[in-house]
Image (spheres, grey):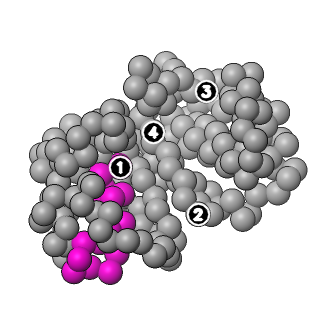
């Protein structure tokens, strides 16, 4: 089972941020206070709120009892709860995917891009797809991000070790242990989800 939550930063008030900040743990508050950019502080507070709300609803547990920790690779997890989650932010949206199995999510706002940058992360076959599809760059990029978030290592590993074939009906991941899909979040955005197959 999987559920995706989204939050628009445009709909958040200063009052919301103050209330949500007060509800954060001391450690998370310190992380927020270290950020100099007000927009980044707001995003961090909103992301914490969305994450805990998603985990609370998914698990049926009390919001204030949720403790978010990070593993040795920096991947967040909910302490002592049978749930997996992943978060991403781009433009005006924060998204959170929750599941009873390992999961990763990535969202990107569609914007002008230099397609030559694809050579850094795409295989030759993926590059062909990127060059032939209007949103191919962001589709392949978000799939890779979601996959590496799902396996928990982040993009520090060889990003070309996994590849994706996108057809009209499905997305084929070269790592057969994972199922990937696009999530319809908002016009002008590409969002990919990767989930480990049980």
Q: Which mark is residue 85?
A: 4
Query: Which mark is nearer the camera, 3 or 1?
Result: 1
Name the spot of residue 136 as percent of width and height, x first: 29, 72
Which mark sits nearer the N-terminus, 2 or 3?
3
Residue under numbered circle 1 = 145
Task: Tell me the SS state at disc 2.
Answer: loop
Q: Callout 2 environment at 10 Å: few (<14), some (14 to 19), or many (20+)?
A: some
Query: Which mark is nearer the camera, 4 or 1?
Result: 1
Left or right? Give the position of 184 relative to 61: left
State the separation of the CA atoms marked 4 and 1.
14 Å
Residue range highlighted in magenta: 130-146
Residue shown at 48% from the left, 73% from the top:
111
Residue shown at 41% from the left, 50% from the top:
105
Q: Which mark is residue 91?
A: 2
Residue 109, placed above or below residue 196: below
The quarter of the picture where residue 172 lies is bottom left
């Amino acid at each position: 089972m999987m559920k995706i939550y989204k939050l628009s930063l445009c709909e958040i008030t200063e009052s919301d941020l103050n209330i949500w900040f007060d509800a954060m743990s001391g450690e998370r508050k310190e992380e927020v206070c270290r950020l100099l950019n007000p927009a980044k502080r707001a995003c961090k507070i909103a992301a914490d709120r969305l994450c805990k709300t998603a985990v609370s609803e998914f698990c049926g547990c009390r919001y204030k009892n949720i403790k978010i920790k990070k593993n040795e690779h920096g991947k967040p997890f909910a302490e002592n709860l049978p749930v997996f989650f992943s978060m991403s932010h781009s433009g005006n949206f924060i998204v959170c995917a929750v599941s009873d199995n390992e999961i990763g999510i990535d969202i990107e706002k569609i914007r002008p891009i230099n397609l030559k940058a694809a050579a850094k992360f795409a295989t030759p076959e993926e590059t062909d797809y990127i060059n032939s599809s209007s949103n191919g760059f962001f589709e392949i990029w978000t799939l890779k991000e979601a996959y590496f978030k799902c396996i928990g290592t982040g993009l520090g590993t060889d990003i070309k070790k996994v590849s994706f074939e996108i057809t009209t009906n499905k997305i084929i991941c070269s790592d057969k242990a994972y199922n990937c899909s696009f999530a319809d979040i908002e016009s002008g955005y590409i969002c990919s989800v990767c989930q480990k197959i049980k």
